[in-house]
Amino acid sequence: MNTTVHSEEALVLRQTEAGVATLTLNRPKQYNALSQAMLAALQAELDAAAADKSVRVVVIAGSGPAFCAGHDLKEMRAQTDPTFHKALFAQCGRVMLTINRLPQPVIARVHGIATAAGCQLVAACDLAVASDSARFATSGINVGLFCSTPGVALSRNLGRKQALEVLLTGDFIDAPTALQQGLINRIAPLDQLDAAVGKLADSICAKSPLAISMGKELFYKQLEMGLEAAYACASETMACNMNSEDAREGIDAFIAKRKPEWKGC
């Protein structure tokens, strides 16, 4: 399946090829700021990907010079009703939770700056590949706004002191620092970024879709548990996985030294 959805007006562009759905934020002149409409468009595309069994991996990318510059400050300042702001941040939280709960792994393709809620988006994705020129910051503090919601995702990626330094200073960190601190998985030169993202996505696509889906769900679920409960939950998941068609096929293929034929979810 190879589909492309392009429109100058579309806030999120979708391209699907070989099981990989690429969702591209498309407000390049606004550095892909997450307006209310942009968040709604991204939510709709994520929901569609979750329901599409042909999609094995989702990639989130950005158009223009930036990956994502966070919330649209002009839109936020134009609204004086606190109800609007509460709804906006709740809407953003739903998008981040959707990424977490999506059955497919989600990879952030970060070619440029990712600031504030844009940095949150990188941290919320399961995996991230960045260009060697990408930079990251939670810069809300520079305008008197502590990046509280980005801090939720950052504190679950970076160590506490590293996360707090980023949140308290608003200073940029470069791609090597982001890699060292655990915000991203891999770095590539800009002209090799697509190849690096593709290599990671292809590796995931080659695996059992059922095992990937079950594994991602279990991974996040057990993180919030105590050690004993985590082992109990993981044991139950592994037993269910072991009794699936894909596990039986995978083991038989391994013994027979042939390529497995996955049945899917």
Image (tube, rainbow, N blue to C red):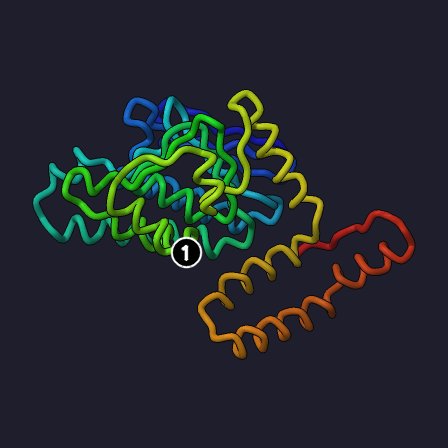
The residue at 53%/51% (across/down) is 51
State the image quarter where residue 191 is shown: top right
- Res 34 seen here: no
Percent of width and height locating residue 246: 74, 59
Percent of width and height locating residue 141: 20, 43
The residue at 81%/51% (across/down) is 260
Rendered position, 247 above or below 18 = below
Furthest residue toward right = 256
Q: Nearer the viewer, residue 51 or 248?
A: 248
The residue at 37%/52% (across/down) is 153
Which quadrant: the C terminus?
A: bottom right
Rendered position, 117 above or below 30 = below
Query: Dot 1 corresponds to which residue?
Result: 156
Q: Nearer the viewer, residue 211 or 9?
A: 211
Q: Nearer the viewer, residue 263 or 25?
A: 25
Percent of width and height locating residue 3: 57, 31
* SS class, disc 1: loop
Q: Is residue 160 left or right of residue 193?
A: left
- Res 31 seen here: yes
State the image quarter where residue 90 is shown: bottom left
The residue at 85%/55% (across/down) is 254
* Residue type pointed to by label 1: Arg
State the image quarter where residue 143 is shown: top left
Q: Nearer the viewer, residue 172 or 44?
A: 172
Percent of width and height locating residue 41: 36, 40
